[in-house]
Amino acid sequence: ARDVHALGVPSVILFGLPDKKDEVATGAWADNGIVQQAARAIKREVPKLVLMGDVCLCEYMSHGHCGIVKAAPQSLGAAVAAPPITDEYEIVNDASLELLARTSVSLAKAGIDIIAPSDMMDGRVAAIRRALDDASLINTPILSYAAKFASGFYGPFRDAAESTPKFGDRRSHQMDPANSNEALREVEQDIIEGADIVMVKPALPYLDIVRRVKDRFGMPTAAYNVSGEYSMIKAAGRKRLDR
């Protein structure tokens, strides 16, 4: 953190890999969670470095999904053994919002300056804004992963965070790459709910969406160049050097 700040980088975003995972993402909202510990330590040593906190549950869930999972009558074990079929389980949206809001308040109290929800649950920005305001954290801004597309580019990060879903996938709540109009609706909804900054993720394959979001809404707009994109660019650079 000191090195980054000395180089003139104004902010970093923190993700957590807990010692233990469970089905209610305890490590995400616990006062002694790994990101909470990191935030306190960094703020003591580098107080002017702006800290963003990723708010999602997948890294803390035993099953690797971004929210509370409700199983169909078959067991989750059966869902793992068989080809993933979407009606074998459900990501329970509203119950997940409670954990996301609780996580956001915990992170902000620990020293996180900007809350960055990446889960793509419906209504999460409004739920987080209410929770922050109720906790007298009214000046904590929200950077919303507003148009987060389902993508294989997340692969290296999921390996590092051990957050690959144990069954199924995330297409029920992450964006359809072919549906740009829905992406704009998602961004608009997050702005209505109180987002201060909106994000498009991944970045390079969706530069057209970045442009459309900025042109239409004029909001501060972030573009997330994710792990797979970074790996691809680094590999291309090595190939060029090899020549």
Image (cartoon, rainbow, N blue to C red):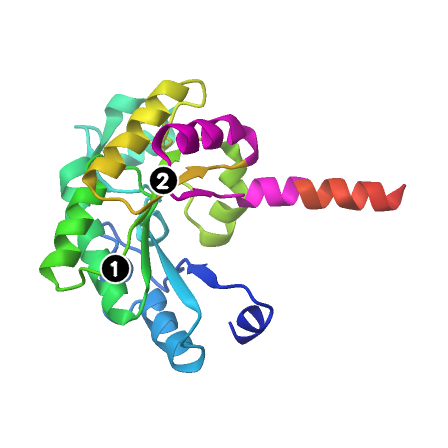
Q: Which residue is mark 2?
A: 219
**Label ID, residue 140:** 1
**Up/down of 149 relative to 241, above or below:** above
Name the residue located 22 percent from the left edge and 61 percent from the top edge.
139
Question: Under tag 2, what secondary structure?
Answer: loop
- Verify whether residue 237 appears in magenta: no
Question: Under tag 1, what secondary structure?
Answer: loop
**Few, some or many C-alpha atoms within 10 Å of disc 1 (few <14, some 14-19, many ≥20)?**
some
**Up/down of 28 relative to 158, above or below:** below
From the viewer's side, name the closer residue of 3 and 84: 3
Identified by mark 1, the residue type is: Thr
Q: Where's residue 74, x and y in %?
A: 21, 29
The C terminus, quarter of image: top right
Q: Main secondary structure of the magenta part?
A: helix
Name the residue located 33 percent from the left edge and 58 percent from the top edge.
114
Tell me how far mark 1 sits from mark 2, CA to CA: 17 Å
Does residue 149 appear in this view? no
Question: From this viewpoint, which residue is outermost toward the bottom?
Answer: 45
Q: Specify the segment rendered in magenta.
A: 204-232
| 191 to the left or right of 59 | left
From the viewer's side, name the closer residue of 112 and 99: 112
**Up/down of 8 relative to 202, above or below:** below
**Up/down of 242 relative to 110, above or below:** above
Name the residue located 57 percent from the left edge and 41 percent from the top edge.
228
Name the residue located 22 percent from the left edge and 50 percent from the top edge.
100
Name the N-terminal-most of marks 1 and 2. Answer: 1
Q: Are marks 1 and 2 in contact (CB under 8 Å)?
A: no
**Label ID, residue 179:** none
| 154 to the left or right of 124 | right
